Image (tube, rainbow, N blue to C red):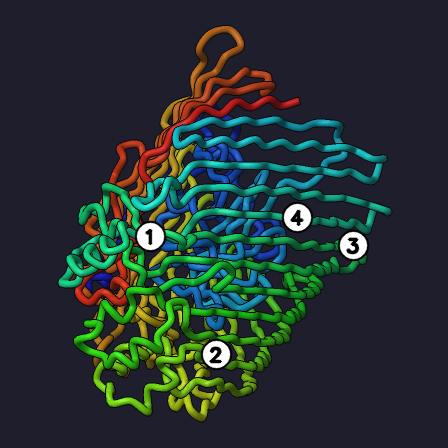
Amino acid sequence: MTIRGSISVSALLLAASLGATPVWAQTAPQTPPQDSATQLDEVIVTATKREERLIDVPVAVTAIGSEQLQNSGVSDIRELTGLAPSVQFQTPGGGADSSIRIRGIGTTSTNPGLESSVGVVIDGVTRARTGVALSELGDLERIEVLRGPQGTLFGRNTSSGLINIVTRAPSFAGVEGRLEGTYGDFSNMRVAGAINLPLSDNAALRVEASSETRDGFYPDANSQETLDNLDRQFIRAKLRWEPSETLSWLFSADYTQREENCCVAVLAIAGPTYGLVNTLAGARGEIGYTSNNPFDREASKSVGRVNSENIDDWGFSAQANWDLGWADLTSVTAYRSWEASRSQDFDHSGADLGFFAPDGLHQNFDVFTQEIRLQGTAGMVDWLVGAYYSDEDVRNDSAYRMGADYPLIYGGAATFQATTLAAFTPGDGARGVGEQNGRDMSVFTHNIFNITDQLSVTAGLRYTNNKKSIDFWGENFNPACNSAVATSDAPGITRFCAPFWDTRFNPAGDTDSRSEDAVTGTFNVSYEFLPTLTTYLSYSRGYKSGGYNFDRAGFTTPATPNARDLAFSEETVDAYEFGLKGEFFDRSLTANLAIFHQKFSGFQLIEYTGVNFVVRSLEEAISEGAELEVTWRPMQGLTLTNGLSYTDAYYPTSAGNSTYSGREMEQSPDWVNVTSVTYEFPISGDLTGVAYIDNRYSSEFFTGGFDPNRVQPSFSVANARFSLRHESGDWAVDLWARNLFDKDYFRRIIPATFQAGSYSAFLGDPRTWGVTLRRNF
């Protein structure tokens, strides 16, 4: 499915860019351009912890400003895929299941033992995992997507990239705020508001809150409820205090709550067990499956089983900025707590095969972080030094339960002795609990040497010490399996009790600890041909720490478990990149090109087998390709953007594992193209119209594993919004639609649990539409 054409494609994009350079150079002015009707706004980013023009930053970064975020209706990071072609977002189940990929690389798992390949930083605070970052974002100033490994500037190391989110800060200017209400189909209702209150000449408070509900997309055949709904609340307060001209403080606190009927999959492919599932459910007067067409969106779960996920996410931070005269000192102190409890019918059918009871899957993250940076200028050097510390406690408690139909799916009385079946009690199962403490201590430096007015060299270095300890234990509370060794049902017992309910757990556990050191960094050479045309060449080494697999199936000998069996090693990446950035035609057109090659060693791969998660460390993985982002304003009011990404992410023949060697990575389409059109025009009097549409095209990709039954074909998803606004900015009315053409597509396809040959699927959202009223004051 993948053609190893990254070198030729990269060369083609590079040639096209260089071929156009003489024309651009001729038209590019030598002095800053004057404002004109078609001139694009100057984009300022803080990707290097300094305010710089995007064109001057020798890093591959997609910058999305507040106006574009408002036009597109982005309210959480899952919606960034319509604006950033190199970002692939996957939400197969609840928030804990979510994964972000940049350039084809990410972490896909509910397993909290694996850290995220893509970091998420909100207002200077690193979030522990991708799923932990899925909260309402509130009012946004900008979002920056940094592609490639990061480590010398932002909190924790990341091996693939980073999403930096900056929310709106309090202002001293005066009292102002907004009220917003939305109504859409599926009974979608959302209310939100914010208020900015100056408390004195040097203090201001900003408070914002929102509440959103929506019916689910999937009616359950065996109950009156719908699944996959929304029910979430959010509040954030920020206090800005400047006690002197040289010292400023920003205090922030937020809380998010979700109580949703989530985590539902539908039948994608009916296998040999399809008829048996319907028979087993029918014997209790229930429906196994109503359709083998997944896009009928008809879900089935056993009566009495509950699909729910409740999340509480809160935290606070304090950021101090102190101008010392000779340097600027910044301190960011934060504490965050995230807790999720889930119940689920995880065979996703009307047959009662397996489930999590209420609170049967429980995860906690409690994280304290402290970051200190000192930066200044000395001669030709813009220097920065810093230190980072985090203390993270993670707890994962999962209790799998067997349903009444579990032994029957394997043949029932034809397979087991009557004594074994008599010992079986529905609801019995097994439990695994892991508690981990992780401490990360780092020191880093990031320095820009301005050799000449045109030539600069960037050198960054980071030393990290990571320590983790785990206490993991499991118990088997199924009498049938516990007594299995004394029976003569060996063939049936093998299937009946393993791998969820191993006969040797009764109970068993162990502890372990590990420590590792890593040196990472970056080296970059940037040259400015003109004030409007720059190029760079960079090398970066990234790192993602090792850890422990929070799955009891990882024990080699469950009867005498050794927690070291659960350990896996760190992952490193060597990344090379060439970039070219330009502004042309009086800054009515901007273009950014990046060509990259990334080689991962010890690549951490987690695979869902249909029953459990297995962690593998592969010797080598590759991600290479090219990206081109263009913004053009050909006439007043009309803005066009296009982002094209080619990524070849694969396991080479040197991967060290015959199963994966030569295969492409899951959730990594070769081609992605993101296009948007924004047209702002006067209507009459004080009214202005803004029409917006974006479209994301993705080529085919494996949604998981290398099974041809798990492929998502190429597809496109479009979103649209029309806004009627008063020129004063006092009010606006928006009509919007997401997935405008109601495109059917899979987020992920998995082997159906306990149903050999069948597949379940998590689907992309159907078309949704609504109207939003906004009032600013």
Name the amino acid, label 3.
Asp
Badge 2 crowding class, 10 Å Cα cut-off, few under 14, some 14 to 19, many 20 or more, is many
- The quadrant the N terminus occupies is bottom left
Residue 97 x/y as whole percent: 42, 59
Residue hosting label 1: 301
| Earlier sequence position, callout 1 versus callout 2 | 1
Residue hosting label 2: 548
For marks 3 and 4, give the CA distance: 28 Å
Q: At 33% across and 42% down in the image, what residue appears?
A: 218
Which numbered tag is attached to residue 254? Answer: 4
Looking at the rendered image, the disc whose residue lies closer to the viewer, 1 or 3, is 1
Residue 554 x/y as whole percent: 39, 81
| Quarter of the view holding residue 658 | bottom left
Badge 1 crowding class, 10 Å Cα cut-off, few under 14, some 14 to 19, many 20 or more, is many
| Earlier sequence position, callout 2 versus callout 3 | 3
Q: How many marks?
A: 4
Name the amino acid, label 2.
Tyr
Q: Secondary structure at mark 3?
A: strand
Name the amino acid, label 4.
Asp
The residue at the far top in this view is 685
Looking at the rendered image, the disc whose residue lies closer to the viewer, 3 or 4, is 4
For marks 2 and 3, give the CA distance: 42 Å
| Earlier sequence position, callout 3 versus callout 4 | 4
Please report contact status of discs 2 and 3: CB closer than 8 Å, yes or no. no
Residue hosting label 3: 323
Name the amino acid, label 1.
Lys
For marks 1 and 4, give the CA distance: 35 Å
Q: At 35% across and 65% down in the image, what residue appears?
A: 403
For marks 1 and 3, give the CA distance: 60 Å
Residue 587 x/y as whole percent: 44, 35
| Earlier sequence position, callout 1 versus callout 4 | 4
